Image (tube, rainbow, N blue to C red):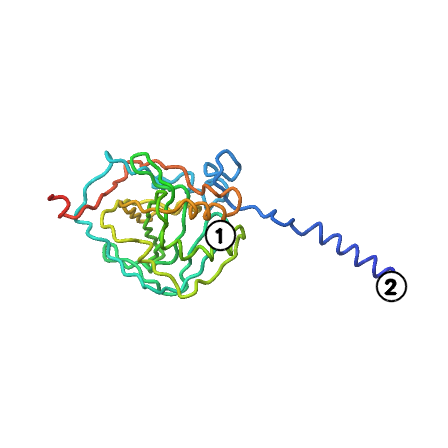
Amino acid sequence: MSPSRLLFLLAAANAVALVLLPAAGAEEDEFGYIPGTPRGPENWGSLKPEWATCGGGRMQSPINLRLPDLTLAPRLGYLNYTYHQNSNASVVNRGHDIQVRFDGDAGGLVINGTAYRLRQLHWHTPSEHAVDGRRYDMELHMVHVDARSQAAVVGVLYTVGSRDEFLHKLEPYIIEIANQKGKEKMVNGGVDPNVAKGQDTVYYRYMGSLTTPPCTEGVIWTVVSKVHTVSLSQLALLKEAVVDGNENNTRPLQEVNRRSIALFLPLTLLNT
């Protein structure tokens, strides 16, 4: 084969490859948060057969935690959790949110005698759950899983104010992976989930679902009553770090459908 013929074939092959390769940034997220778009929340249930629960489920999350729907449940007891102070973790940009993934045993909590291990945590801006119709500026989800892969999630609400110390330690890592879907960085020295959870004892409890596809139901939700604070710059960082279109990564409120919503108050508070 002549050199000129070989060069022609190589050039043709390169041209075909350029046509077949996706353009930079052209990859589309599997789901999105912008209402009225093909991949918006109202369409999640029809995007994939395995996501049908997002559209037809009767125990979906998040919900509005309304005072008239609450039942006092002092017998639920204090949250029984034990987290490890220096847990190995990586900060991951999932495109639709920023996640802290625990790469070992970070501890966990016990609910009704069942142990749930902490697997990951992530943030939503603004909050997904509402309290008496009010949505807050941010919500942290601490995702736990038991031996049967059943989930229990602790939700923590935030309003703009003083900086959040847990998030403050992670800021350099979030900056490094900002706007880079799939990028991750290991946290030097690990993280302390106890700082994220805080020490509040009052909480809401109900049965719901994951708030992203596949919207699996049977999730035990614990939403901490005390509202924490996050600085305006920290909130802006989380919004800027995700892929465009996910700055407001909050699912619309779902119907309660007569579900029981419990409020745990210690007996000492009930008797005062």
Left or right: where does residue 177 sit relative to residue 259?
right
Q: Counting residues from the N terminus, which is met first, the one under dot 1 or under dot 2?
A: 2
> Which amino acid, by three-letter code, is at mark 1?
Arg
Looking at the image, which is closer to me, 13 or 234?
Answer: 234
Q: Which residue is at a point 69% across and 51% down the rendered structure image?
A: 20
Residue 94, numbered label: 1
> In front: 160, or 6?
160
Q: Residue furthest front?
A: 162
Quarter of image, res 256: top left
Instruction: Check the image and report above or below for 15 versus 83.
Output: above
Judged from the image, the secondary structure of the residue bearing numbered disc 1 is: loop
- Callout 1: 10 Å neighbours few (<14), some, many (20+)? many
In this orientation, which residue lies closer to the viewer: 18 or 258?
A: 18
Residue that mark 2 sits on? 3
Where's residue 40, x and y in %? Answer: 49, 38
Label 2, residues with CA under 10 Å away: few <14, some 14-19, many ≥20: few
Vertical position of residue 162 compared to residue 88: above or below: above
| Image x and y of residue 127, in percent | 37, 42
Q: Secondary structure at mark 2?
A: helix
> What's the amino acid at mark 2?
Pro
Q: Quadrant of the N terminus?
A: bottom right
